[in-house]
Image (spheres, rainbow, N blue to C red):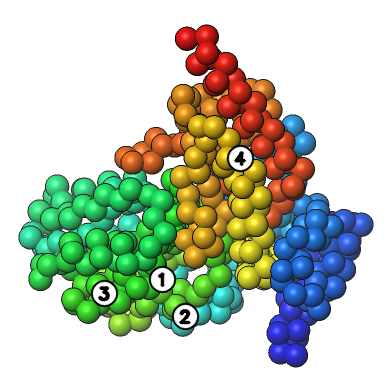
Amino acid sequence: MQNRRTFINRLAGVAGLATISPFVNEVQGKDLLKRLKLAQSKPTSEVVTDEGFWMAVRQAYTVSPSIINLNNGGVCPQPKVVQDAVEHYNRMSNEGPSHFMWRILDAGREPLRHKLADFSGCSTEEVAVVRNTTEALANVIFGLRLKAGDEVIITKQDYPNMLNAWKQRAHREGIVLKWLNFEFPIENNDTIIREFEKAITPKTKLVHITHMINWNGQLLPAKEIAKVAHKHGAEVLVDGAHSFAHIDYKISDLDCDYFGSSLHKWMCAPFGSGLLYVKKDKIKNLYPLNAASEPESEDIRKFENLGTRSFAIEQAIGHAIDFHQMIGNERKQQRLYFLKQYWTEKVSDLPGVKIGTPKSPEFSGAIALLQVSGKTPVEVSEFLFSKYKIHTVAIEWENIKGVRITPNVYTTLKELDKLVAAIRDCVASSESSARKR
C-alpha cells in the first residue's frame, strides 16, 4: 500500500507538469500515465516484455526517425517532460536573471538535494549537485590530503578523465599509482576482489573503483571491494557514471566514502548535470575543487561553488527523477538487461562473433561489446551506420576492443532485430572478403 501511495504521488508530480510540458496533455502522455498505473498491479517480469508499455515510454522521448541510437552509453536523451522543464525554467530565468535565478530558482536546490538524497539512500547533508562525473570525482581526487609516497589503486580500464587527474597528482606531488589491468569479461567476484586486495599495502590510502566499466559494461563488486579496502584502512572512491539509475541500488549499499555520477546518463536528466556524494565524516578534510570561504567546513554545499550555472538544468533534474521512478528502478534495470540479452543471444553463435561483456545480470546491464573477427571496431561501427543508420561507438582501450552497443528504455525489439540483421550482414561481408583474399 505504501509503495502504491508513493507511486501515485510521483505520478501526480509528473502530471502536475501540465503547465510546463504539453506532452502530459497529449494522447501519448495520457496513454503512458494510464499504462504506468496498470503496470503497478503486474509482476515486473510481465512488464519487462510488454512491448505496448515500452512503446508508450518511447513516445515520451523525441526519438529521431532517421537513425537508431544505440550509443546511450555516451549520454542519454531526456524525455519530453524534462526537455520542456529546462525550457520553462530557462525562459523564467531570462525574464529577470538576477531575480529569478538567484532569488527563486537557486532556492530550489535544497528540495532537489532532498530528492537526490532520498533516491540515493543517503543523508541530504552528503549530496552535492554538480555538472558531471568528472567534476564530482575531481573534487575528491584533488581534494584528498595525500602526500608523496601515499598509494592509490586504480585500473587501466578506469575512465580517462579520472586517470589523467590521478596522473597529475602523481606528477605534481609524488603520490604512487598502483595499476591493475584486467582481462574482461570476468564473471567471478573473487577473481576481481583478489586482484584489488593483492595491490593493497600499508601505504594504500585510497582504492578507486569504477562500478560499471564504460567500455564494455562489466559490473564490478564495489561493495565487496570496499569492505576489503576498509579492512586495510584505505578509503574508497566509486565512479558510478554508468551504474547509477541503471542498476537498482542505493549509494549507501556500496559502503563507499566518496561517489560521483552523471545524471545525464541513465537518469536521463539534462545534459551537464551530476551529483557528488561524500560520507558525512569525510567532508571536513576534503578540500573543494573550487575555492570556498571555509574549505574545512563540514557542509556538503562547499562543493557547489560553481559561480553562475544553469539553474534551468538543475531544476529539471527533479523532473527526471520523477520520470525515472515512475518507470521504477527494478523494472528499468530488468528491461535494459532484457534488451542486451535479446540481441546478443541472436548473434553470439555467428562465426567470428564474440560478446566481450558478461552474460549474467550480476555482472552486466544494458551495455554490450560486439567483436567481429577480421574487422576492426571502427570498420564494424562504420558499416552499421553507413548501411543501416545504426549509431554505435568503436572502442579500443587497453585490453578492450569492439563496438559498444547500448539500448535504452525507448529502444524497440524491432530496432534490435534490424541490428541483428545488420550484424549478420557485416559477418557475411567479412567472410566474403576473407575468401577473396
Q: Mark 1 near mark 3, Cβ–Cβ under 8 Å? A: no
At x 50%, y 32%, the residue is: 352
Disc 1 versus disc 3: nearer the observer: 3
In the image, is residue 189 above or below residue 400? below
Give the distance between the C-alpha atoms of the residues marked 2 and 3, in whole angstroms.
22 Å
| Lower sequence index among marks 1 and 2 | 2
Q: Which residue is mark 4?
A: 347
Q: Quadrant of residue 144?
A: bottom left
Q: Position of residue 314 (x, y in %)?
A: 57, 62
In the picture, which quadrant includes the N terminus?
A: bottom right
Percent across and percent down for residue 32 are: 83, 62
Residue that appears at 50% across and 75% down: 250
Question: CB under 8 Å between callouts 2 and 3?
Answer: no
> Could you give the CA–CA distance between mark 4 and mark 1, rounded to whole angstroms?
40 Å
Label 2: which residue? 122
Mark nearer the N terminus (4 vs 1): 1
Disc 3 crowd rating (10 Å Cα; few below 14, some 14-19, many 20+) is some
User: Disc 3 and disc 4: Cα gap in Å?
Assistant: 38 Å
Please name which of the two marks, 3 or 4, marks the residue nearer to the observer: 4
Vertical side of 389 occupied by 92: above or below: below
Tell me the element at label 4. helix
Classed neighbour count for the residue bearing mark 2: other residues with Cα under 10 Å, few (<14), some (14–19), many (≥20):
many
Looking at the rendered structure, the kind of residue marked 2 is Cys
Q: Nearer the viewer, mark 4 or mark 1?
A: 4
Q: Secondary structure at mark 1?
A: strand
Contact (Cβ within 8 Å) of mark 1 with mark 2: yes
Residue identifier under label 3: 228
Cα distance in 3D space between marks 4 and 2: 41 Å
Q: Is residue 433 visible?
A: yes
- Dot 2: element: loop
First-in-chain label (2 vs 3): 2
